[in-house]
Amino acid sequence: INKFSREFVSTDMTIEEGNERLREIKHIKPLPIAVQLLGAALISAFFCLLFEGGIADSLWAAGIGIASYTLSLVLAKFSLNYFMKGFCCSALACVLSLLVCIPFAGLHYASILIGVQMIFVPGGAITLCIRDFLAGHMVSGLAKMAEVFIIAISLATGAGIVLALWSSMGGVI
């Protein structure tokens, strides 16, 4: 879309040609689900390592990342908003991170959880927010910032509720 918008304003493309190009873009198929799941596993594993997790932690993060991302794909079919999707995926990641640490005492649930949550952090929206502010577009920057904060709150709320329930049931954090 970004490339198209640049072409549209810098060439003599007609509105009809522009609409045709937009229809072509609309029909571009997304990456296969297997590739998306591989990406989720790699993102989870590498961010887990970045946040002081070990090799075993990152392997578990990869598996939990696949599970959480699969849930997000299922929830997308129901057209849930970002808040609910982030909340549910974060809660699942937290539950699974805590559960794998029960039989394997050397694992760090926090590193695993943070690694998995990084899949859902809206990096593109954060970048656009900053770009809009730097360009002087305060309204669109504030709108993007609100979206980023809502998603961050959903991720924190999903994990926070699970951690509070876990702790209240006697689980060690």
Image: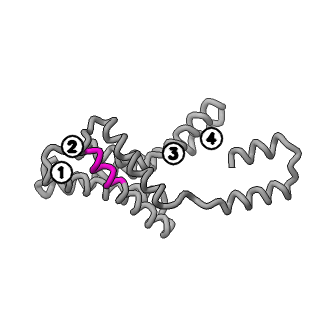
Judged by depth in the image, the label closer to the viewer, 1 or 4, is: 1
Q: What residue type is labelled 4?
A: Val
Task: Establish if 78 lies above or below 118.
Answer: below
Place of residue 7 in the rendered image (x, y in percent of width and height, measured from the top left): 78, 44
- Within 10 angstroms of label 1, few (less than 14), some, or many (20 or more) residues? some
| Along the viewing direction, whichever of 68 and 63 lies nearer the viewer | 63
| Along the viewing direction, whichever of 23 and 36 lies nearer the viewer | 36
- The mark nearer the N terminus, 1 or 3, is 1
- The mark nearer the N terminus, 2 or 4, is 2
Residue at image position (26%, 39%) is: 53
Query: Which residue extends farthest left?
Result: 170
Q: What residue type is labelled 2?
A: His
- Within 10 angstroms of label 3, few (less than 14), some, or many (20 or more) residues? few
Q: Do the residues labelled 1 and 2 touch (CB within 8 Å)?
A: yes
Residue identified by numbered label 4: 139
Residue identified by numbered label 3: 146
- The mark nearer the N terminus, 1 or 2, is 1
Residue identified by numbered label 1: 101
The residue stretch that appears in magenta: 57-65
Residue at image position (85%, 43%) is: 11
The answer to whether residue 26 is left or right of residue 144 is right
